[in-house]
Amino acid sequence: MKKRIIAIALLVVLTLALCACKNNSEPTDDTTTTTTAAAVPDTTTTAPTTTEAPTTTTAAPTTTTAAPTTTTAAPTTTTTQAAKTVDLSALSNQIISKAGVEGAMPLPQDRLTDLYGIAQSDIASAGCFITVNGSFPEEAIMIEAKDSAAQSRIVSALNTRLADVMVQAENYDAENYALAKQCKVITAGNYVALFVSPQHAAMESVFNAAVK
């Protein structure tokens, strides 16, 4: 009986020994290893990539403002000579004296409407005379018009009178007609004159010197 127990014990020992050898010779299970490796999380942290901030270069706008050129023209001053004030009545006497007119008779202003068709409202002042001596009666008409419009009407009336004189002289004789053609209506501003006389050139000279 004792021998039998020892034999069973040896058999058990031998069996265990064989099992141990078998376990040592078996290959390692790859699946287990792989699973274990996969189960371990990758703790390697990749350092974040630093993105360089974009460099923005904004060129400052170049503003070139040309200074405005201001050209101020010097004011033009026009000096208008004041119109002369002439005493036509006194000038009439002066002409009579300088031209040596004989038998001169003053012609009142209010007669200018009847004789020459000049409206009294157009007349500012006047100095006139006539003569009845000789074959060529003399007329010296000097008028200051009230304004430019009145001056134009007076010039027209005196030109009409001169045309009538020329017609009369033409019918009278050639010498007087030639003399009448030399006479003319003259103006200086608002002053108007007509000298129908053999001395018309001398009279015109005195008149122009006074009013111009």
Image: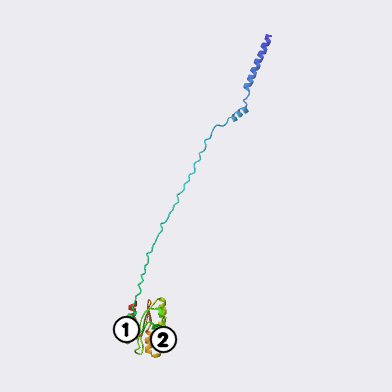
Q: Quadrant of residue 91?
A: bottom left
Q: Position of residue 32 (x, y in %)?
A: 62, 27
Relative to 41, residue 12 above or below: above
Q: Position of residue 104 (x, y in %)?
A: 33, 86
Q: Are marks 2 and 1 in contact (CB under 8 Å)?
A: no
Residue pointed to by mark 2: 164
Quarter the C terminus occupies: bottom left
Mark 2 → mark 1, Cα distance in angstroms? 24 Å
Q: Quadrant of residue 167?
A: bottom left
50 left or right of 164? right
Which tag is nearer the camera, tag 2 or tag 1?
1
Q: Secondary structure at mark 2?
A: helix
**Earlier-in-chain disc, 2 versus 1:** 1
Quarter the N terminus occupies: top right
Q: Residue furthest top?
A: 2
Q: Position of residue 69 (x, y in %)?
A: 40, 59
Q: Amino acid at mark 2?
A: Asp
Q: Secondary structure at mark 1?
A: helix
Which numbered disc covers residue 96?
A: 1
Q: Is residue 205 visible?
A: no
20 left or right of 203? right
Q: Is residue 164 visible?
A: yes
Residue at (42, 79) in percent of width and height: 153
Relative to 64, residue 33 above or below: above
Q: Position of residue 5 (x, y in %)?
A: 67, 11
Which numbered disc covers residue 64?
A: none
Residue at (41, 86) in percent of width and height: 164
